[in-house]
Structure formats: C-alpha cells, structure tokens
Image (tube, rainbow, N blue to C red):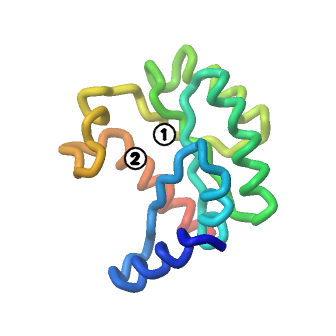
C-alpha cells in the first residue's frame, strides 16, 4: 500500500477534513495507484497539447479498474472554450472521458508563484469546486 494512504488517513483524522486533495503529478503512477485506493474522485489535469492528452490513457488504465470516477480538467489553455481548448475538449470527449465544464486558462499572474501558499484569487478553480460539489450531490 505504501506510505501515502496512511499519511492521507492520518491527516484526515487529525484535521476532521471532509475532503482531502492530493496533487500527485502525472509522472508518478505508483503514487496514483496508492491514492486511488482511498479516492472518491480523480481529477486528471492536462494541458491542451496533444502530448499531454496522450498521457490520459495511462492515468485511465490505473483509475478505471478501481471504479473511481475520473474527470479531465483542461489546464493552461490559451483561451477557454475556443481554439486549441475547444479542439482538446472534443478529442478528450471523443475518447470517452468526462471533461470538466471548467477550463483553466494559462495565467502566470495568478498561478505561477503560489506553490506553498494561498493565492489571492482562485480564478476558475472556484467554478471547479462548484462543479465537483454538484457531482458529489448527484451521487
């Protein structure tokens, strides 16, 4: 099982948190295999570039057998809903994945230097939270 699951469970008990968000990163399939064991939902963030979209199959191959729902989140798109973002959405939907209605535009002003701190604004991520809450309520 590894150390991640006990770490998540410990922090959930200690904080009383109803939800824990674990940012795994796309280059750590062994960590995803651990986290999906206790996940209620997997959010797979990907850029709109073809090479990033091609990685979804690997993520799906780990998540799908568990039965945990997965939502693809298009991130770092030049402009939400048009151009490459629209093309990427269509490609991902045609491949059979659920895609979030929210797209995160590339915005270095908001997101570039927030590692380890709370950003001044959450940008489109607040819309993502609303969407995820609605999905949770519908289950």
Instruction: Please state the horizontal and vertical placement of residue 50, each as a whole percent of the image.
Output: 66, 22
Which residue is label 2 attached to?
Answer: 127
Res 100 visible: no
SS for dot 2: helix
> In the orientation shown, which residue stands out farthest toward the top?
83
Residue at 70%, 47% (x, y): give it: 59
Camera-nearest residue between 28 and 58: 28
Which label was assigned to residue 102?
1
Residue 2 visible in the displayed image: yes
The one nearer the camera, 30 or 97, is 30
Residue 50 appears left or right of 109? right
Give the vertical position of 60 relative to 31 (above or below). Answer: above
- The percent position of residue 70, horizontal first and vertical second, equals 65, 53
Residue visible at 51% across and 60% down?
Answer: 134
> Residue pushed farthest left?
120
Element under disc 1: strand
User: Is 52 displayed left or right of 60 in the figure?
Assistant: left
Q: Residue 90 carries which label?
A: none
Quadrant for residue 138, please give it. bottom right
Q: Quadrant of the C terminus?
A: bottom right
Could you say where residue 110 lies in the image, as x and y percent from the top left?
A: 26, 34
Place residue 122 in its image quadrant: top left
User: If you read the primary sequence from the N terminus, does the residue marked by circle 2 or circle 1 appear first?
Assistant: 1
């Amino acid at each position: 099982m590894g150390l991640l699951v006990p770490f998540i469970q410990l922090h959930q008990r200690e904080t009383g948190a109803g939800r824990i968000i674990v940012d795994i990163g796309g280059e750590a399939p062994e960590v995803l295999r651990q986290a999906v064991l206790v996940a209620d939902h997997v959010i797979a963030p990907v850029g709109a570039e073809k090479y990033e979209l091609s990685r979804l199959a690997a993520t799906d191959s780990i998540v799908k057998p568990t039965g945990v729902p997965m939502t693809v989140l298009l991130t770092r798109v030049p402009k939400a809903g048009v151009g490459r973002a629209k093309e990427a959405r269509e490609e991902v939907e045609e491949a059979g994945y659920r895609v979030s209605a929210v797209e995160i535009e590339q915005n270095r002003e908001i997101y570039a230097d927030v590692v380890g701190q709370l950003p001044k604004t959450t940008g489109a991520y607040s819309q993502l939270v609303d969407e995820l809450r609605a999905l949770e309520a519908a289950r």
